[in-house]
Image (cartoon, rainbow, N blue to C red):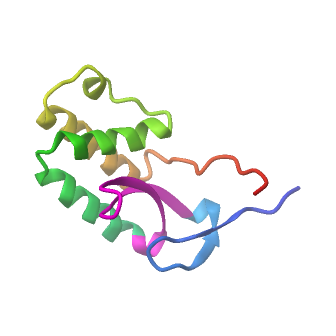
Amino acid sequence: MASERQVVCSGCFGVVPESRVRLIPSFNDDVQRYVDTCRCEQRLEAAVEQTRSRLAVTEGAAEVGSTAAFFERHGIFINEYRRGDPVPVVRSILLASLERLRSGQLRLVIGATGPL
C-alpha cells in the first residue's frame, strides 16, 4: 500500500499529509485571479476568511467568475454563474460554498499526479 502524499501548506510552507490539508481558492495579485492553494488546519480559518472578505465586497464580474472557475476546476458547477445571473446572486452562492469548504462539508481533492 502506498504511503499518503505529502503537501506543502501555501500559508506556512509546512509539509503535512494530504488528508490534513484543504484545497481552497486564494486571490493571486500577480495573475489577477483565484488560484488553488493548500492550507493546513492551523492556517485554514485565516485563509478562508481572507478569501471570504475579499469576495464579499467585490462587484467585479471577472473576480467572481474567477472564483466560479476555481470550483469548476474541481467539478462543482455554479449554474447561476454559467447562465449569467447578476454578480450579487453568484457571489452569495460562492460565499456559501466557501463556508462549506471551511466547515469540511465540502472537501476538494488535489487530484492525480504524474511523472514530471
Residue 85 seen in render: yes
The quarter of the displayed image where residue 26 is located: bottom left
Residue 6's spot in the image, x, y percent? 68, 68
- Nearest the viewer among 108 and 66 is 66
Q: As drawn, which residue projects farthest toward the front?
A: 30
The residue depicted at 30 percent of the width and 64 percent of the height is: 29
Residue lying furthest top: 83
Q: Position of residue 56 (x, y in %)?
A: 15, 52
Q: What predominant SS class does the magenta segment belong to?
A: strand
Q: Which residues are magenta?
A: 21-43
| Vertical placement of residue 56 versus 37, above or below | above
Q: Residue at x 41, y 54 (%)?
A: 35
- The answer to whether 82 is drawn above or below residue 52 in the figure is above
Is 35 contained in the magenta span? yes
**Relative image position of residue 89 (x, y in whole percent):** 15, 32
* Residue 10 horizontal/vertical position (percent): 48, 70
Residue in view at x 11 percent, y 45 percent:
59
Residue at the image position 27 percent from the left and 28 percent from the top: 81
Q: Is residue 103 visible?
A: no
Q: Is residue 25 magenta?
A: yes
Look at the image and tell me in which quarter the C terminus lies. Answer: bottom right
- In the image, residue 41 sits, relative to residue 107, either above or below, namely below
- The answer to whether 54 appears left or right of 104 in the picture is left
Extreme residue toward the right, this view:
1
